[in-house]
Amino acid sequence: QLSNKKRIKKFNSIRLKSLDKSPQKKGVCVKVFISNPKKPNSANRKVARVKLSNKLFVTCSIPGEGHGLQKFSTVLIRGASVRDLPGVKYKLVRGAFDLGPVKNRRRSRSLYGTASIKK
């Protein structure tokens, strides 16, 4: 079928702009603090403000129980939304750089950087 106008390419929006189309990014912790979740939930969520290698600042959740993060710790972030924390669209990768693995973790160890348990 003939047409006068050219075909228009669909524009795909980038969901996580600070990652620059890469799977992970390296960053440095600027502030490690505790945040409270949205309405039906109640807890103290561990959160870090991170300056990425591309000079952007993002807020990241620290997964798992216990961490040794402090200011100027080097971390690796990945894109993963935390549903009950508004504005937190990233998680830190356990077992990479200065963020160690979760101790005594038996199940779903790969998410928390824990090595296999030797018998």
Image (spheres, helix red, strand yellow):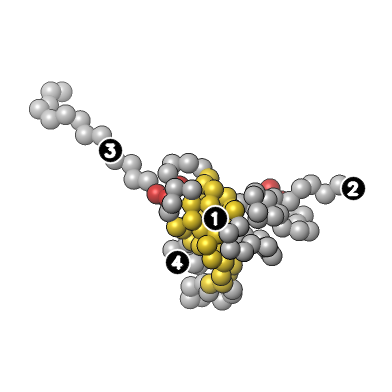
Q: Position of residue 13 (x, y in %)?
A: 34, 45
Label 4 sits on residue = 86
Q: Residue at x 54, y 66 (%)?
A: 31
Q: Is residue 54 left or right of residue 65?
A: left
Q: Residue at x 10, y 27 (%)?
A: 4
Q: Is residue 43 above or below residue 108?
A: below
Q: Is residue 53 above or below residue 2?
A: below
Classify 10 Å Cα crowding around label 3: few (below 14), some (14-19), many (20 and above): few
Sequence order check, earlier mark of 4 and 2: 4
Q: Secondary structure at mark 2?
A: loop
| Cα–Cα gap, marks 4 and 2 | 42 Å
Q: Is residue 112 visible?
A: no
Q: Quadrant of the N terminus?
A: top left
Amino acid at dot 4: Pro
Label 3 sits on residue = 10
Asked if the residue at tag 2 contacts the one at tag 3, i.e. Cβ–Cβ closer than 8 Å, the answer is: no
Sequence order check, earlier mark of 1 and 3: 3
